[in-house]
Image: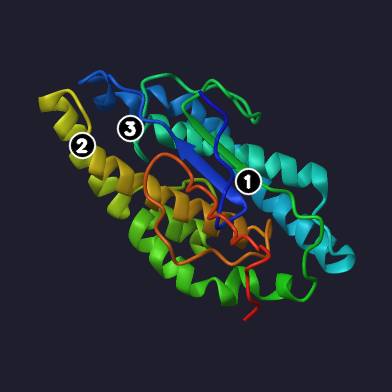
C-alpha cells in the first residue's frame, strides 16, 4: 500500500483501500472472528477514556497533550479502524487485522492524527460537550447507537461505526457481495466518507485537536488531495 495522502481539511487522516476480490461468505461469520479483538478493544477503550481525562488536565494546565497518551489514544483509534474496516464498518478487506496499536503500512486501512504542538486551555473546557453537539447529532445518524453510547450514555467508549446508516449500507453491501461477488463502489465510497467524518469528530471530542471537524463528507478510500495555493507572481495584483 502506498503512503497515504496528507489531509487537506483535517489533521485526522482515515484511509481504506477496497481490497477486492472479497470472499462472498466470509462476512457472515466475521462477527465471530472478531471476538478476540472486541475483548481487547473493550479494555483499550476504557484506558482511552481514563487517559483522555488525564490529558484534559494536562491541556488545561500546560496547553499540551501529553505525547505518550496521545500516541496510545491514536493507536486505539487505529486498531479500531482496522477492525471496523475488516468487519462491519466497511467490509473492505478479508485480511485479518493485527493485534497492534502501531501503524501497519501493509494493511489496506490506515489512520493517523497529527500531533498538535499547542492546544487552547479555554477551548478544552467546552469543545468536547458544547461545541461538538451538532457533530454528535450527525454522527449518531451515521453510526447509530454505538456512537451515541460512546458520546456519553452509559459511559461506554468501545464501538465506532456500529449500526445507523453505516451499518445499514454495509449490510446492503454484504448482500450484494453474497450475490454478485463484489461490493458496490458507490456505497463503499459513501460508507468510507461517513467513517472518516466519525473519526474526525472522535479526535475532536477526545481533545486531540482544536480544528473543528468540517461539515464535509469526503467520500472514497483516500483522503482528498490538498487544494493548491494560489501562486503569487509579478503580475498578481493584491486585492
Mark sitting on residue 117: none
Q: Which residue is mark 2?
A: 184
Q: Where's residue 89, x and y in %? A: 37, 40
Place of residue 169 in the rendered image (x, y in percent of width and height, measured from the top left): 24, 46
Could you tell me residue 122's position as x and y percent? Answer: 77, 76
- Residue 91: image tag: 3
Q: Nearer the viewer, mark 2 or mark 3?
A: 2
Callout 3: helix, strand or loop? loop
- Identify the residue at the far left of this view: 179
Extreme residue in the right direction = 62
Give the crowd class for mark 2: few <14, some 14-19, many >=20 residues within 10 Å: some
Closer to the eye: label 3 or 1: 3
Q: Earlier in the sequence, mark 2 or mark 3?
A: 3
Image vertical order of residue 194 relative to residue 118, above or below = above
**Mark 1 crowd level (few <14, some 14–19, many ≥20, 10 Å Cα):** some
Q: CA distance from mark 3 to mark 1?
A: 26 Å
Which numbered disc, 2 or 1, marks the residue closer to the eye? Answer: 2
Residue at left offset 47%, top offset 46%: 159
The answer to which quarter of the image holds residue 137 is bottom left
Regarding mark 2 in the picture, which secondary structure is present there? Answer: loop
Amino acid at each position: 500500500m502506498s503512503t497515504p495522502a496528507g489531509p487537506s481539511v483535517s489533521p485526522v487522516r482515515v484511509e481504506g483501500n477496497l481490497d477486492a476480490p472479497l470472499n462472498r461468505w466470509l462476512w457472515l461469520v466475521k462477527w465471530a472472528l472478531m471476538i478476540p479483538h472486541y475483548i481487547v478493544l473493550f479494555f483499550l477503550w476504557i484506558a482511552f477514556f481514563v487517559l483522555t481525562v488525564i490529558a484534559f488536565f494536562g491541556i488545561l494546565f500546560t496547553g499540551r497533550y501529553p505525547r505518550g497518551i496521545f500516541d496510545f489514544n491514536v493507536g486505539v483509534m487505529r486498531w479500531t479502524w482496522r477492525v471496523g474496516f475488516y468487519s462491519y464498518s466497511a467490509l473492505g478487506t478479508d485480511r485479518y487485522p493485527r493485534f497492534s496499536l502501531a501503524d501497519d503500512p501493509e494493511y489496506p486501512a490506515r489512520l493517523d492524527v497529527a500531533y498538535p504542538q499547542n492546544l487552547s486551555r479555554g477551548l478544552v473546557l467546552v469543545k468536547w460537550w458544547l461545541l461538538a453537539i451538532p457533530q454528535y447529532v450527525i454522527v449518531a445518524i451515521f453510526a447509530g447507537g454505538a456512537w451515541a453510547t460512546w458520546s456519553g450514555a452509559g459511559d461506554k467508549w468501545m464501538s465506532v461505526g456500529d449500526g445507523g446508516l453505516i451499518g445499514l449500507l454495509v449490510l446492503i453491501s454484504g448482500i450484494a457481495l453474497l450475490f454478485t461477488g463484489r461490493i458496490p463502489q458507490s456505497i463503499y465510497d459513501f460508507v468510507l466518507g461517513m467513517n472518516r467524518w466519525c473519526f474526525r469528530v472522535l479526535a475532536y471530542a477526545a481533545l486531540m485537536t482544536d480544528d473543528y471537524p468540517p461539515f464535509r463528507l469526503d467520500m472514497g478510500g483516500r483522503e482528498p488531495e490538498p487544494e493548491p495555493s494560489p501562486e503569487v507572481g509579478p503580475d498578481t495584483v493584491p486585492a
